[in-house]
Image: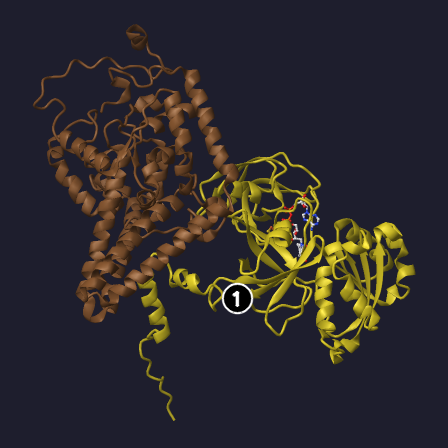
Amino acid sequence: MTVLQKKAHNPIGHLTPEDIEQLGVELDAIRQSVIDTRGADDAAYIRKVIDAQRKLELGSRAILLISMFPPAWVVGTAGLAVAKIIENMEIGHNVMHGQWDWMRDPKIHSTTWEWDNASPSEQWKHSHNELHHTYTNVIGKDNDLGYGIMRVDEDQRWVPFYTAQPLWNFVNACFFEYGIAAYDLELGKNLATKERRNDPEFRARAKVTLKKIRNQMTKDYVIHPLVSGPSFLNTLAANATANLIRNLWTHSVIMCGHFPEGVETFERKSIVGETRGEWYLRQMLGSANISGSKAMHFMTGNLSFQIEHHLFPDLPSNRYQQIAPQVQALFEKYGLTYTTGSLPRQVASAWKKVIRLSLPNNFGRKARAKVLPMLPVPTRRTVDDAAAA
Amino acid sequence: MSLTAPSTRPDRPSLRRRLVRLAERATTPLLPADYLDLFDPLRPGADLRGRIVEVHPETADAATIVIRPGADWAGHVPGQYVRIGVDVDGIRQWRAYSLTHGPRPDGFISITVKAVPGGLVSTHLVRESRPGTLVHLEQAQGEFVLPTDGGKFLFVTAGSGVTPVIGMLRNLYPVADGGVVRLARAAAYDIVVLHVAPSEPDSIFIDNLRALDAAGLIRLVARYDDEHGVLDVADLETLVPDLHERSTLACGPGGLLDALQDHHDARGLDLLTEQFRVTTLVVGEGGTVDFTGSSSGAGTTVDADGATPILDAAEAAGVLMPSGCRMGICFGCVLPLKEGAVRDLRTGAVTTATPGETEGSGVPIQTCISAAAGACVIDH
Ligand SMILES: Cc1cc2nc3c(=O)[nH]c(=O)nc-3n(C[C@H](O)[C@H](O)[C@H](O)COP(=O)(O)OP(=O)(O)OC[C@H]3O[C@@H](n4cnc5c(N)ncnc54)[C@H](O)[C@@H]3O)c2cc1C
Ligand code: FES
């Protein structure tokens, strides 16, 4: 893809500023309808999920105490992997978004939640909630576009490092939780110069992260294996496998959110003075959904409703599915493309892009027709645009 | 004889402590308690909670709720209240309710709630609460209790203000199958109850009061607005001729308590009061409230209008705030005001904090009854 502003066919060229504001009003109404009906059933839902997740984790870990028996190993590992996925996706990610803060339960609150992941929740909330969700798909602002190690957009400059990005992406998938921790620490940037390396603020954050990683590792690779006695090695392998499965799964789901074909990116200057309607519009075009079964939606933490999540990041995740038809109807009404596809299709699409963009834009192809000058986001016409129009 | 210091081994943590640490390492980033709570939320060491065991109606709009408190419940003195956190429409709400029993043999506690029109928690508790529901508790507190050494007292109770009083009376005069039990310790008390209610059917616990009166243990003076007209405190001396020999304990609406206070002050009589509700007198001008400090809410800026307590405004904006009674009596919501002005919604009094002039740590304010009266900075 190319930043929307440079595309030959501008997918929002047909919308007037009034249309965009009206779209915002209609989305606000959907949001309000959920807030107005949020209540005891929703609270019961998240409590039930947390309860079940913890029991599943306990049960799986108990079974792994005898993991030297292969059936126990398989069942325990599968259970633990599922428990870890639910904990990260449907619970952790969503609680840290403040989706459940309205319950005023200090135990299920964005400000107190810590998740089973290498990255401390404080740092995750900053890089994810504040940066990624605010600057979604804005080149140069949203580091989630390639996590700083990959080129996932034609408009990101190619450097030879990117040639190996399919490999980077695979390695990142396997160790995704550490990738996230490094990314939340902005390791690439902060290790680059001596000055940054010695910045006390960075050092303090790095210390917190290292401590979290140490605790996580001690739990999964020392304590639980030790408690398993003769099953030490089997449990260690089981926990490593569960973490690997969780990493691969979360990485795949997250790739599907913003990398597949059809998702738009935006120029940095296009968001200056952005209105609420325009922000909504950017979220609509910058995210992709995954279609599938109820169980699949649940296991993605309802991030399969990435579009709905990006429009309303703080609404309870169990409601995304319910409002999806209304949101999709708005896409149709305003002539926009609701990007969605099955999990295998979206994962393949994202991988295809990672592989394609590992090479320079026009590599091995005839030079494309000269890209048109920037097409307007309708609200901010420039002299050039006016001439083009 | 020479004294040698006993040889000390390096402090080794106790076995229990080491096991706890092991459990913590095994459950990180959660705590062992997060898992234990799944199975036994009332166990020793857990956050204080309770489970509703029984709900029975007292009048058309009042019900008694019997709760089994968690193992760490420290007990209470009759007349005290408990702060209870209930989820209404999925949202945790905290309110204070007087305990309507003395310590019970079954270890349960009870509260009696009157559903106030439009009242969020009271209506929920009276009409919606079901046995088996988990509620959140704090330890009992409050100064509205009977002196232990006996004496002559007048209780003035209005409406649901009877609740702390019934707690004290039940403790003095327990009722068993065979009728009221006469305890030796009760002999030292001489009690008159002046009970005021809009009408007789509205009166919570009127049967209990009548039974005590019939048994000659207390003297009951019941006044119903619809029958006798609204109580005038000037009539007190007629209703209770030996008023001057008694200490008064009163619980009811602010207006009645204020009138009683004036009446008793003028006569130099003892008065202890308990109020369930504060009245909003003055509307401030509102402003932004910035939260600084180390809490999770730090960094948030909240727009608060002059009529909304900072506590409500901050919670509505997603800040996790300390709170308790939410009506200015428990000080569970106190936070230091570092800078700015707030207005007390009850009295209109303005409290200000000026950096450099006021104490470094800030001026503690009760966020539940303070509205912003200009831009404020609160340490949280
Ligand atoms: C120390 C203490 C002890 C208390 N003990 C008892 C008790 O034993 N039994 C009991 O029923 N209540 C008791 N209360 C009052 C109780 O805490 C709640 O304030 C009351 O139940 C109303 O809460 P709510 O959520 O239903 O009303 P809210 O939703 O908070 O208020 C709704 C409306 O009701 C009005 N209102 C609030 N409180 C009262 C009140 N007390 N009387 C009349 N109108 C009110 C409000 O101004 C508002 O207009 C006690 C309060 C305190 C501080
Ligand atoms: S919460 Fe009780 S004083 Fe405010």
Asked if residue B319 is positioned above or below residue A82 in the image, the reply reads above
- Where does the N terminus of chain B fall, quadrant-wise? bottom left
Q: Is residue B94 left or right of residue B170?
A: left
Residue A340 placement (x, y as % from top left): 29, 31
Left or right for B83, reference A381: right
Camera-nearest residue between B314 and B344: B314
- In-front residue for pair A350/B96: A350
- When asked about the image quadrant of residue B35, the answer is bottom left
Q: Between residue A196 and residue B323, name the one nearer to us.
A: B323
Q: Quadrant of residue B352?
A: top right
Task: Specify the amino acid type for callout 1.
Answer: Gly
Q: What is the x, y in percent for residue A118?
A: 27, 50
Q: Is residue A383 above or below residue B337?
A: above
Residue B291 visible, this angle: yes
Residue shown at the point (91%, 64%) measured from the top left = B241
For this orientation, the residue located farthest to the bottom is B1
The answer to whether B267 is drawn above or below residue A41 in the figure is below
Relative placement, left or right, of A364 versus A306 is: left
Tell me the residue at 51%/39% (across/down).
Answer: A37
Q: Which residue is mark 1?
A: B70
Q: Which chain is brown?
A: A
| Colour in which chain B is drawn | yellow
Element marked by disc 1: loop
Where is residue A272? Give x, y as percent: 36, 23
* Residue A330 image position (x, y, % from top left): 40, 25
